[in-house]
Amino acid sequence: MRAALRLFRVANTPSAVADVLSGIVVAGGTIASVDAWLAASASLFLYGAGVARNDIADRVKDASVHPDRPLPSGALSERQARLLVLAAEVVGIVLAVVSVRSTCVHGGPWIAAAGALLVVLLAASYNAVHDRRPLLGAALMGATRAANLLRGVVFAFLFSAGKGMESVPIAVASSAHAVLIFAVTRISQLEGVRDPVDLPRRRRLFVTTAPIALFIVAATLKDPSTAVVLTATGLAWCGWAMRPATFTPPLAGACVGRAIGSWALWNALLVSAAGTFSQAAGVTALFPAAKLLRRLTAQRGA
């Protein structure tokens, strides 16, 4: 069981749950329902399956770089891993469908299923190209997490038929997701590279994107003072996650681990900008949950 949890990087899955919750709130919906959390919980399986597919694709390389991982260590066979991935993808799609069973939009379950399937396909595309075309791979990873946020937008749409939805915050939030994950993925590609010259540029991309996005979302939906406070908070989060002291080749993974490990906090800031602080508190609770799962599974790095 522990090997399966490590294969799925279960400590990172709360970050994907937070994606959907923030998408719901940014689209004008509420997360104070069982259905909202059911839709978000689908990401536990969709995200885990995508990460597991990555381990399957990298199993030969991991034999020398990460010999402690489930596949190279022999804790799981490749066949077992593939069956687990397939089962997780099916469960994720089913949960997405069940969460909108009472939607007011005709064909809602099919739309929810299509959104979940898109996340699966984008993750599979990333795993197919990330080694050969790193720039495209990073873009696909960013698109995968943006699509996961948009699953929350779709959920809100299916229950409101689009009433009360603002296009600007949705576009800004999903774009920020894509850019931030693109930057994190590009940083992860620098592990083992000696003296990477473009490291500061990749850091700046991350540090500047989040505060700007928070300001635009909050300024659109709230008042200027709230926008300024959230922008400053977002800048502090970025500075902590991307602090320069970690930017040496052997420690690039630690920086990526901090960014993904605290990703629920980024989503909580988005929820604060688009919704209420009580909703943000619910999303923030996913951060200590991720920390606990990391300890229980002894997961290291991202």
Image (cartoon, rainbow, N blue to C red):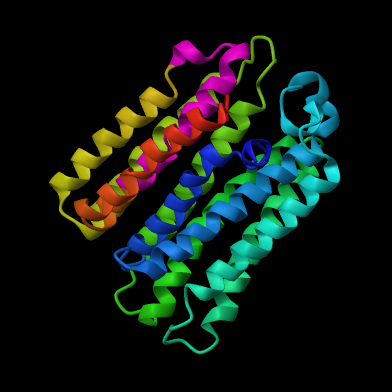
* Residue located at (69% from left, 38% from top): 135
Per the image, is 169 magenta?
no
Helix, strand or loop: magenta stretch: helix
Across and down, in percent, residue 52 comes to: 70, 43
Across and down, in percent, residue 128 comes to: 80, 46
Image quadrant occupied by the N terminus: top right
Across and down, in percent, residue 133 comes to: 77, 38
Image quadrant occupied by the C terminus: top right
Left or right: 82 in relation to 290:
right
Across and down, in percent, residue 37 comes to: 41, 62
Residue 88: name its quadrant. Answer: bottom right
Region rendered in magenta: 244-269
- Reply above or below: 34 against 211: below
Query: Can the viewer see residue 140 in this picture?
Result: no
- Reply above or below: 37 against 5: below
* Residue located at (56% from left, 41% from top): 10
Query: Can the viewer see residue 122 in this picture?
Result: yes
- Reply above or below: 19 against 137: below
